[in-house]
Image: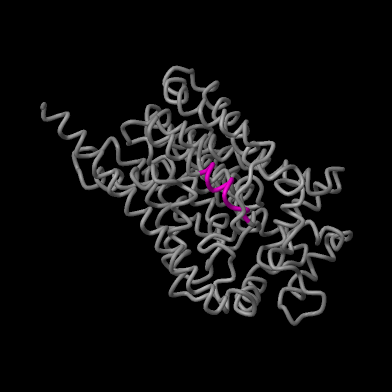
Amino acid sequence: MRPSVVGVNRDLLRDLYAAVCAALLVLTAVLVGTVIQHRDGSLRVGWPPLLASWDPHVGPGTPAAVVVAAAVVVHGPSLAARLTWRPLLLSVWGAGLAWTWSLALVDGWHRGVAEQLTTRNEYLRAVGRFHDIPAALRDFTRHILIDSPDNWGAHVAGHPPGATLTFVLLDRAGLGGGGWAGTWCITVGTTAAVAVLVAVRTLADESLARRAAPFLALAPAAVWVGTSADGYFAAVAAWAVTLLALAVRGVRPVLNGFGSGLLFGLTAYLSYGLTLMAVVAGAVLLLGRGSALRPLLFALAGLVVVPVLFTVAGFDWWEAYRLLVTRYYQGAGGVRPYGYWVWANLACTVLIVGPATVAGLRRVVVRLRRREDRGDLPLPLLVLSALLALLVADLSGMSKAETERIWLPFAVWLLPACAFLTGARGWLAVQAVLALLLNHLLLTGW
C-alpha cells in the first residue's frame, strides 16, 4: 500500500476515534443527566442534556427534510466545487433555508414555528409592554429581578432589550405574532452560513470555503435555528465578524469597518454573553496584521453608536447585567449543578455541530502543530478563537443548560473545520442523520 494511502487511512481512523469519543461524551451526559434529573430534578431539563422531551413523531416537514438532506449529501460537494462564487453563496443560503424550514415543520406550523417564540416566557409576550418604547427602556431594569413588580419573563430579563425590541419593531411594521417572528429568525438566521463562508474565503482560502459550504448548509444546528431568537443573534454576530474580515483585508475598509462596529454594538444589546465574540474579532484583527489599524478605528466608531442610543434612551447595560446575574441565580441557574453542566454543555455542542465538526477540529489542531502549513493557519485560528469563546462561556457558569441554542453564535464558526475532512459525503450523511433523529425523536424546547 502506498504511503499516501496509508496516511489517509490513518487520518480517517483518527477522525473516527474523535467522533466516537464525542458520541461517548453525549451518551455519558444522557445517562448521568437522567440519573440526576430523576433523583432531584435539579437539571431542569426534560431529556438531559437537551431542553427537550422524548416524543417520536413525523410531520409535514419530514419528506422535505429527507429530500433536502439527500440532495445536499449527493450533490453538495460537487456543486460547491463547480459553482461560481455568488451562485454558491445563494445556493448555500437556499439549501439552509430549505433544511431549516423542513426541520421546523416536522413539528407542524403551530408547534414548530408559530408558537415557538410565544411560549416559555419568550419575547412576544412582552411586546404589549413596549407601546411607549423610550419609557419601556428607561424602566427595563426595574423588572429584571424575580421579586420585582411585573418582572419580565426569563428570556426577556435574560437579554438586553435589543432582543425584545426586534419583535416590537416587527409588530409595529405589521408583522406581529409568532409566525412572522419565526419567519424572521429562520430567514435571518440562515444567512449566518453565508457570512461564515465569506469570512473563510477572505481570511483563508476560497477552496476551503467551498469544502466547508455543504456542512454549513446541512448543519444539525438548524434544529435550533428554526426557530429560536438565538439563530437571529448568530447571524448578526456572524456578519459583524465577516464585515471586519473584509475591512482588514482591504475591501472597503471604511464602510465595512464601520458596519462591523455597528453590528458588534447591536450584538451586545441582543445578548450579554455575545460580548465574547470579541475573542473571534481579535483573531480577525490578528490575521489582518498591519492592515487592521485603520479598519479598527472605523469599527470602534461604529461600535459606540448602538450603546449611545440605548444609553441616551435610558437603558443602563452594566446595571442590567448586574441584575441579570442576580436573576440568573434566583431562577434555574441557581439550581442547576455546575459540576454536571460544565462538561454536559460540551455534549450539547457536539449535537449542534455534529460528529463531522469534532473530527474537523481534530484536524485543525493537527494543522496548527505543523508549522510548515502556514498557508492553512488562518482557518484554524478563526475556528479555535470561536472554540475559546465557547469555553470561556462554559467556565463562567452563566451558561448552564440550553446551550444548544445559546451557543449557536459560536457554533457556526466551528463548522468550517469540516473543510479539512476527507470523504465529505460520508460525513455529510452522518450530520444529516443526526439532525433528522434529533428532530424526529425529540420535541425540542426551541
Which SS does the magenta portion mostly show?
helix
443 is within the stretch colored magenta: yes
Given the current orientation, which residue lies at the most extreme bottom position?
A: 147
Residue 419 in percent (x, y) is at 37, 35
- Using the rendered image of the protein, determine whether residue 221 is visible from the camera's viewpoint: yes
Q: Residue at x 70, y 47 (%)?
A: 112
The colour mode here is one colour
* Bounds of the magenta segment: 435-444
Image quadrant holding the C terminus, namely bottom right
Q: Nearer the viewer, residue 335 or 146?
A: 335
Residue 417 in percent (x, y) is at 38, 41
Image quadrant holding the N terminus, namely top left
- Using the rendered image of the protein, determine whether residue 261 is visible from the camera's viewpoint: no
Q: Residue at x 78, y 43 (%)?
A: 180
56 is within the stretch colored magenta: no
Residue 363 in percent (x, y) is at 29, 43
